[in-house]
Image (cartoon, rainbow, N blue to C red):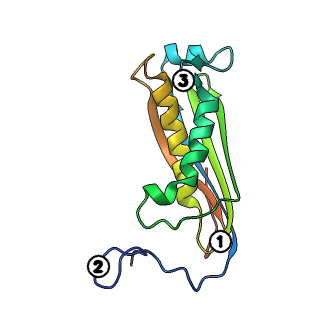
């Protein structure tokens, strides 16, 4: 049975009132594929736009989004995050890898916060670079690992 559906098949928030507070961490990843022309703009470092530096702005947007996950995703519990970090690296000259790591001491996990942070950071890159090309793609948004709660998870590469 899905956790957000009751016995009458109606949507519901999960009751975490009886769960213990434990350390919960999660890491999620999003990949941004850049066409040649856009990737070339990053060849000498940070790409500056009228909206600001692309990766710096994406980092800020990702952290802000992770903090607002409960406002965006139905039934997510509002959490006061202890930590949220966004890293942006290039796997090659065309592939930007965005990772969001989140931590909290709480009764529920932070997978959705990590996924939301990585996704919004990737969408911010798209938004800031779309004037150069609409052939940018955001793909492979996924949970990489989670710790705490009922079970741990780590993506097997």
Q: Left of 84 or right of it: where is 40?
A: left
Residue under the point 58% across and 46% down: 64
Residue in the foreground of this view, choosing between 35 and 157? 35
| Residue at x 43%, y 74% (from the top left corner) | 13
Query: Mark 2 falls on what kind of element?
Result: loop
Return the x and y of residue 111 as percentages of the image width and height.
56, 60
Instruction: Name the disc covering residue 106, or none.
Output: 1
- 2 vs 1, front mark: 1
Which sits earlier in the primary sequence, circle 2 or circle 3? 2
Q: Nearer the viewer, mark 3 or mark 1?
A: 3
Q: Is residue 154 above or below residue 132?
A: below
Query: Which residue is nearer to you in this view: 140 or 68?
Result: 68
Residue at image position (53%, 54%) is 68
How far apart are the two marked residues, 2 and 3, measured between alpha carbons? 45 Å
How far is the residue under mark 2 from the one under mark 1? 27 Å
Can the viewer see residue 151 in this picture? yes
Density class for disc 3 (Cα within 10 Å; few <14, some 14-19, many ≥20) is few
* Labelled pair 3, 1 in contact (Cβ < 8 Å): no
Q: Position of residue 120 (x, y in %)?
A: 51, 42
The quarter of the picture where the N terminus appears is bottom left
Q: Secondary structure at mark 1?
A: strand
Of residues 118 and 53, which is closer to you in this image?
53
Q: Residue at x 65, y 35 (%)?
A: 88
Q: Earlier in the sequence, mark 2 or mark 1?
A: 2
SS category of the residue bearing label 3: loop
Determine the image quadrant of residue 40.
Answer: top right
Which residue is denoted by mark 2 in the rendering?
9
| Residue 81 horizontal/vertical position (percent) | 65, 59
Q: Nearer the viewer, residue 116 or 78?
A: 78
Locate residue 29, reporting x and y percent: 57, 45
The residue singled out by tag 3 in the image is 51
Pointer 3 or 1: first along the chain: 3
């Amino acid at each position: 049975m899905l956790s957000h559906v009751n016995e009458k098949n109606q949507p519901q928030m999960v009751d975490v009132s009886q769960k213990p507070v434990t350390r919960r961490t999660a890491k999620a990843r999003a990949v941004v594929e850049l066409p040649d022309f856009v990737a070339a703009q990053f060849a000498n470092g940070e790409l500056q736009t009228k909206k600001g530096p692309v990766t710096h702005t994406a980092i800020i947007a990702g952290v802000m989004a992770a903090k607002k996950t409960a406002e965006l995703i139905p039934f997510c519990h509002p959490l006061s995050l202890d930590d949220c970090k966004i890293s942006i690296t290039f796997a090659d000259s065309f592939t930007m890898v965005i990772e969001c790591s989140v931590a909290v001491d709480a009764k529920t996990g932070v997978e959705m916060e990590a996924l939301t942070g990585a996704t919004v950071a990737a969408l911010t890159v798209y938004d800031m670079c779309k004037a150069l090309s609409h052939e940018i793609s955001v793909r492979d948004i996924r949970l990489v690992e989670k710790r705490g709660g009922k079970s741990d998870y780590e993506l097997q590469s």
